[in-house]
Image: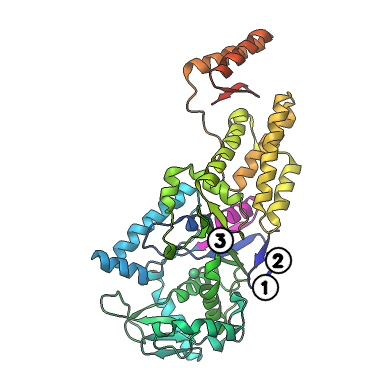
Amino acid sequence: MLRLYDTAIGAVQELELREPGRMSMYVCGPTVYADPHIGHGRFTLVWDIIRRYLMWSGVEVDFVSNVTDIDDNIIARANADGRPATDVAQEYEAVWWEAMDRLGVQRPTHDPHATDFVDRMIGLISELVERGKAYQGADGVYFSAESVPDYGLLARQPIASLKAGARVELDQEQGKHDPIDFVLWKAAKPNEPWWPSPWGPGRPGWHTECVVMSLDLLGDDFDLHGGGIDLAFPHHENERAQAVAAGRRFARRWVHSAHVVAGGGEKMSKSLGNVVSLPDLLDRYDPRAYRLLVLQSHYRSPMTVSDATMTAAERGLERLDGIARRFGTALDATMAEPAALARFSTRMDDDLDTPGATAELFDLVTAANTAADDGRWSDALALAAAVVDITGAVGLSIGGESADVDEEAAALAAERDDARRQRDYRRADEIRTQLQEQGWIVEDGPAGTVIRR
Ligand SMILES: [Zn+2]
């Protein structure tokens, strides 16, 4: 079974599923007010790879990822553009799904929207107020962090040091009793969308959104809560604190993926002004190259996205595509070499060692080509079938026709196959040389000559 680093305990641990053979996971999704950036692309790919790998391993996966369609950024953008917040949210949600589709990220089993859950969020906040874990301040309802004894678990910091760090932000939310408290319900300001509540018109805070939707759709004690490492504290800790305070069993495991470093070496963030838009990246490179780059990086290590790393990933894709073209329709996943699949699983189960698994994958590519070059076809097919099975397991589609094979080159390839069938190896070699001189890579596949640029 898959072992992952659990942020809450600070160690790599095997997943212990609530229901054997069925995994329930929640991953915080986008706030839809701008184009997604390459950091969004990375974390969605990490979770897509985990999900697909579990499915390949025979585990059913319930995958919930939310869409935050009301928040300060959406409202600010709507007011700046002079249009309703719902317009902004719908526009950028469409941009989000288009980018996800291009990346080959599978749609979640459920994609709850915050605005559809406001009643249930009010329900949770009311319960927290009744239990004495939350209180009404001048500008909203706040959660009393100190009311949860182990508050700070996901920050891996004691409450005293969190308090010291939080003090500077106190003036932004005036109704707080304590700097580490956080807002559950925000009283409406002029020009803001609002919903009625026991505390007057307003809207729910982001931290309440995810705790309500995850528990509602996956149930108590669900298997895994994930997201980017920047969300571990305070967002995830605040979700967890609300669940604990409400007497609910929350996520069994907490897993976080690392950030992206764009070109120059600085951490990606809006304030640095070096955000690279995900749609722009996908326009410039084969979208599959981004998935391969994510696979070649460990999910807990920062990943550099630059022209050099993307171009290298595209070259890797060419080698994988070459396997699919060379062996083509002769491949059948059931022929895959079992030892290769076992090595892949061992790597993946070890805290999602995708860099190790990918290195093994490219070794398989080399071995399959060598076996084919030597005419050991049954070995070659078993190795190539493992390549196809493994790339499928991590959502990397390979293959495709060599679009640029012209009629003349195709005719020469066919003539070479005829010559070989007639044992005219001299003529077959002549044609190979002729094709190579025209810039083709010539390989023997199980069904005959395969050429590509
Ligand atoms: Zn969340």
Residue 167 in sight here:
yes
Q: Earlier in the sequence, mark 3 or mark 2?
A: 2
Check if mark 1's residue and mark 3's residue have beta carbons within 8 Å: no
Query: Which label sits on residue 9?
Result: 1
Query: Is disc 1 placed on a helix, strand or loop?
Result: loop
Start-end of magenta stretch: 43-64
Look at label 1 and name its amino acid.
Ile
Look at label 3 and name its amino acid.
Asp
Q: Quadrant of residue 283?
A: top left
Q: Position of residue 273 (x, y in %)?
A: 41, 60
Look at label 2 and name its amino acid.
Gln
Q: Which residue is mark 3?
A: 62
Residue at 57% x, 35% y: name it.
318
Residue at 55% x, 14% y: name it.
412
Residue 334 in sight here:
no
Check if mark 3's residue and mark 2's residue have beta carbons within 8 Å: no
Q: Nearer the viewer, residue 244 or 288?
A: 288
Which one is closest to the eye, mark 1 or mark 3? Answer: 1
Check if mark 1's residue and mark 2's residue have beta carbons within 8 Å: yes
Q: Which residue is mark 2?
A: 13
Placement of 342 over or under 400, stated as above or below = below
Q: Earlier in the sequence, mark 1 or mark 3?
A: 1
Q: Residue furthest right?
A: 339
Kindly report the secondary structure that dominates the magenta region of the rendered protein: helix
Colour convention: rainbow
